[in-house]
Amino acid sequence: MSNNTDQQNTDLDQLVGETTGTPFLPDEKVKMSARNVDVFYADKQAIFDNSLDIGKNEVLAMIGPSGCGKSTFLRTLNRMNDTIPICRITGEIKLDDENIYGKDIDPVLLRARVGMVFQKPNPFPKSIYDNVAYGPRLHGLARNKADLDEIVVTSLKRAGLFDEVKDRLDASGTGLSGGQQQRLCIARTIAVSPEVILMDEPASALDPIATAIIEELIDELRQNFTIAIVTHSMQQAARVSQRTAYFHLGKLVEVGETNQIFTNPAHQLTENYITGRFG
Amino acid sequence: MENDLHIDQHISQRFNEELEDLRSKVLEMGGLVEQQVMDGTDALVNGDAELGAKVVERDTQVNAMEVAMDESCVEIIARRQPTASDLRLIVSIIKTITDLERIGDQAEKLGAFAVQLSDKGVSADKYSNLENISSKALAVLRKALDAFARMDHEAALEAAKMDEKVDQEYEAILRQVMTYMMEDPREIKKAMRVLWAARALERIGDHAKNISEYVVYLVKGKDIRHLDSLPEAKSL
């Protein structure tokens, strides 16, 4: 670790200290757990010693200013950072009781269990049907055509898109509207029956109506999945999540019930951020 | 977290101004309502019908202030979507001005009693013991408004406690008035008027106590209403 990073660590400790609130949940409620996670891009540290549990069937919102490390942290949860050669991660992240950075873990299979939806809808340049069928085919989840049809229809229905596209499943996915494309991506993600869905600003490129539809969908998906969502919209975090985590300069400052965070946050930095004050 | 809520430190300068404006208007309304209670009491105790009429007339100003501030609060909620201490400030203000308006109504009653009594040529000698409960109720109101101005939850808790003195004073007046009534039933009508006025002042103490509770919520985010033993309040 460079001296520069040491200095950053000391400054952060003074500013933030230990994470405030309730980062940890009772064992029986935990779906994923992160312990003492550090992330480095080359010799620059982006995440500082963060520990956090994500509960079963909960929506956890991660908020914070640009560059606070919330997206980086999210991407550690399904090893998306593996694709960046200079990125190095220390600490431990578990899915159920399994260390996802363990030697015997295949990142491709992991990403089927921990799916991801990105900021910009990114359907494949294929038909709507093939977009959703892609994952199940790759992972051999369907024994025959009827099975696959069933998965595609169910996934599109769960993503709240089926009624709008049922007559044109052969049309290209890229021809849909922005909101529909994002729901198509969600359908594609849930088609492989993941356990956790990570969302990185899933509605920031959408208009308010499409956003409302996605938020409603998130609330429904919570019945079957665990969801972690990074968002720049505080109102969105307040609307969709049960717990909210606030990141600042790579450090998890505070985690708590969303109601508490938005009415009476315990840490001054959280208060400053969500009320739009200079911090 | 320290008690200062830093309402002047938003990135939006306009928002700072809106909140500061609202806060000073609450204090302005508080000042007016306080004057109303003092004048209402004076009018009654001194049999001053003219002052009583003035109090009644001025209540429309109090009402207008409540309506205007309510509108400002709704506008801020719609346009700013306040959170955390900002949200608590707006909620506390909406509730505080409701109680201030009701204190205004009670003061108006005192003024109206003063007018009625002088019309009937009734002497005001029986009303002198209202001065005591009035000054106690006013003390709660002043303390609560002061706590709001300084965002001082400890002062607010003291104010809430002070309301007990107002209640005790009311009980004392009640016993005294009942004694008058038993001694001389012809005095019942007059005695009832004293009791109503005392009741109005007792209610003023209750409303002032409510305001002090909103201050605790504003500063600490804790709702201490209807906690008889106030164990949670003590832990603040």
Image (spheres, coloured by chain):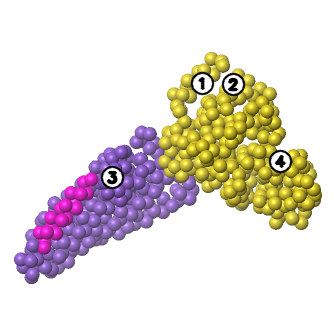
Residue pointed to by mark 1: A8
Q: Quadrant of residue B35?
A: bottom left
Contact between labelled residues 1 and 2, with CB atoms less than 8 Å apart: no
Question: Which chain letter matches label 4?
Answer: A
Quadrant position of the C terminus of chain A in the picture: top right
Residue pointed to by mark 3: B230
Is residue B32 something that shows in the picture? no
Q: Which of the pair B214/B234 is nearer the observer?
A: B234
Give the residues in magenta. Answer: B161-178
Of helix, strand and loop, which one carries label 2?
A: strand
Residue pointed to by mark 4: A122
Give the image location of residue A116, x and y in percent. Answer: 76, 45
Q: Which of the pair A239/A101 is nearer the observer?
A: A101
Outermost residue, left direction?
A: B183
**Of labels 1 and 3, the one closer to you:** 3
**Of labels 3 and 4, the one closer to you:** 3
Chain identifier, purple in the render: B
Kind of residue indicated by mark 4: Asn
Distance (Cα) linking label 2 and label 4:
30 Å
Q: Quadrant of residue A249?
A: top right
Kind of residue indicated by mark 2: Lys
First in sequence, mark 1 or 4: give its number.
1
First in sequence, mark 2 or 4: give its number.
2
Of helix, strand and loop, which one carries label 4?
A: loop
Task: Work out whether disc 1 and disc 3 sit on a shared chain.
Answer: no
Kind of residue indicated by mark 3: Leu
Q: Is residue A170 above or below residue A122?
A: below
